[in-house]
Amino acid sequence: MINALGVGIVGCGLIGQKRAKVLGEARLVACASRKIENAQALAGTAPGAVAFADWRSVVELDTVDIVIVATSNDMLAEVAEAAAKNGKHVLVEKPAARNVRELDSVIESVGLSGVQVRVGFNHRYHPALRQAHALFETGVLGEIMFVRGCYGHGGRVGYDQEWRANPTLSGGGVLTDLGVHLIDLARWFLGNFTEISGFTPTYFWNMPVEDNAFMLLKTPRHQAAFLHVSCTEWKNMFSLEIYGRNGKLQIDGIGGSYGVERVTYYKVLPQMGPPETTVWEYPSMELSWKIEFAEFLDDVRLARTPSAGLEDARAALMVVQEIYTQTGRNRRSEANE
């Protein structure tokens, strides 16, 4: 077994810092950030780690086995592709690229390199969602009918001036940001979507990207996912419901300001009426990051294709791209690239 794999982190903001705390048996050896002081601060948390202002120094470093890409969206694909070409395994944060075209270039390079690449769909690793999916896989819900989900936050003063509000840097608004998480989770339960429709208004924030997105997605069997993501959700919330003919799973909260993680199983009784109800709660926070990276280390050591990979990111971005095309936002985003 390979031990003490060397990790390089590109992007030393909040997400990069979270990733650095859950490396498990791996060790942080290098950091890079446009703001060198951020890289130096993060490198200072690990003995012997070095800091760079240029991310290329990280992906070319011999002691780096895994590159974590935690940059703004405009850099995700470029850094991930360069890391793969240098023979590094990669964990790239969602959405992995600003659009499908960028991601396809990464997929091609990874196919030639033979490295493992995981996309940071860490919501799959929240304990409540893992419990819900494990129950789903037992078949207790019977035939699945539809999924309903809502994910939102209320932004903060100056939110419309941050990089996520700039389509050149972000690729899109809340659909690109939170939407890919809900799309990925809906696919995790229902499979691929072949009918896609959506609406992407900007109701509140003064910015050229959407602050709300409403999606209606259908599988070939007409199982539906009705999803809403928002940055005008004044009280942060996360909710995902999976409806089967024999019962329902409801996941609420993802910790912190979104509330305690909880999964509720409602079992339909033969006589109908009030269902039999079972509840599990998970008060611990930040477990998803730790569980996800531990699994990625196993992916690398076993040469195993990650369960949340580039094709999952591509499927989510295809939904995003189709909705932007329907609403005319694709043309605006491409004009700003």
Image (cartoon, rainbow, N blue to C red):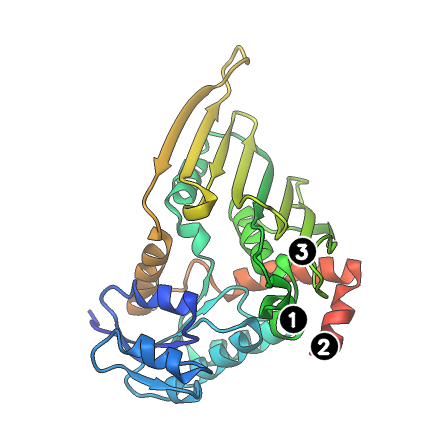
**Residue 142 percent coordinates (x, y):** 52, 29
Which residue is tagged 3?
211
Left or right of residue 177, residue 212 in this image: right
Q: Are marks 2 and 1 in contact (CB under 8 Å)?
A: yes
Say whether disc 2 or disc 1 marks the residue closer to the N-terminus.
Answer: 1
Which residue is tagged 2?
336
* Image quadrant where residue 40 sits: bottom left
Amino acid residing under circle 3: Asp
Quarter of the rendering occupied by the C terminus: bottom right
Amino acid residing under circle 1: Asn
Q: In what element is the residue under mark 2?
A: helix
* Image quadrant where residue 105 sits: bottom right
Please say whether residue 88 is visible from this viewpoint: no
Measured in 3D between alpha carbons, the distance from the residue under mark 1 to the one under mark 3, in whole angstroms, is 12 Å
Q: Which residue in the rendered view is the most extreme toward the front? A: 157
The label number, if any, that marks residue 166 in the structure image = 1
**Residue 4 percent coordinates (x, y):** 21, 73
Note whether 101 is above or below 142 in the view shown: below
Q: Residue at x 21, y 72 (%)?
A: 2
Q: Residue at x 59, y 68 (%)?
A: 162
Say whether disc 3 or disc 2 marks the residue closer to the N-terminus.
Answer: 3
From the image, state whether disc 3 or disc 2 is nearer to you: 3
